[in-house]
Amino acid sequence: MPDAKSPDFHDLLLGQIPALRAYARALTHHREDADDLVQQTLLKAITNIDKFRPDTNLRAWLFTIMRNSFLTNIRKHNREKPGDEDCVSLEVKTQPYHDAYITGQRLQVAMSKLPPQYQELLMLILVIGESYETAAQVCNCAVGTVKSRLNRARKMLIADLEVNDIHDLLHLS
């Protein structure tokens, strides 16, 4: 069993940070919140290292901790509601000009319209590059469910963005 103070375990954790940041950014949509979520996940992982089974996937374990923490944070946020949610200072005043930025924004908007389980699978599989099996572990569902949700999510994106193929998403502008 890995020891939380061992250099090997810390190296394993450090190696997971880029994937954790990408997943956190996909969940939160804000860089600062994503960094906080990664920090919270790592702290919980180190605190609960005795619950990690060495014969399991470390990344899936960390993603599960992150997902559960994120959902807990949402529940807390929904109970607390500080301030006015439709503050005018949060509105964008300048439109983007760079094609890649515009494409990214269109894709983000289209993805935000998808049901959360579809968004999560798109991020895990297409953006982060996780396998279907790992995504199934993280989302606590069958591999077949992952594949069908991913297929439906792709079709919904293609329809919303009015493209013919998933590869056309790279050429939006």
Image (spheres, helix red, strand yellow):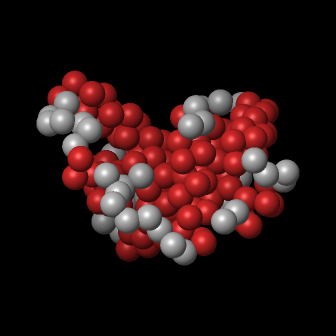
Residue 119 in the image, given as x and y percentages of width and height: 58, 42
In which quadrant of the rendered image does the C terminus lie? bottom right
Figure check: 144 above or below 46: above
Q: Is residue 138 visible?
A: no
Task: State the image quarter where residue 146 is shown.
Answer: top right
- Which residue corresponds to the image point at 56% horizontal and 64% vertical from the top-left? 102
Residue 79 in the image, given as x and y percentages of width and height: 22, 24
- Which residue corresponds to the image point at 79% horizontal and 60% vertical from the top-left? 168
Residue 38 in the image, given as x and y percentages of width and height: 36, 57
Figure check: 140 above or below 172: above
Say left or right for 135 vs 162. Answer: left
State how many labels appear.
0
**Residue at the outermost left position:** 83
Residue 46 in the image, given as x and y percentages of width and height: 32, 55
Say left or right for 66 vs 148. Answer: left
The foreground one among 164 and 147 is: 164
- Which residue corresponds to the image point at 19% horizontal and 30% vertical from the top-left? 81
Q: Is residue 111 visible?
A: yes
Say left or right for 51 vs 151. Answer: left
**Residue at the outermost top position:** 79
The foreground one among 166 and 20 is: 166
- Which residue corresponds to the image point at 42% horizontal and 52% vertical from the top-left? 29
**Residue at the outermost right position:** 164
Task: State the image quarter where residue 8 is shown.
Answer: bottom left
Say left or right for 172 vs 43. Answer: right
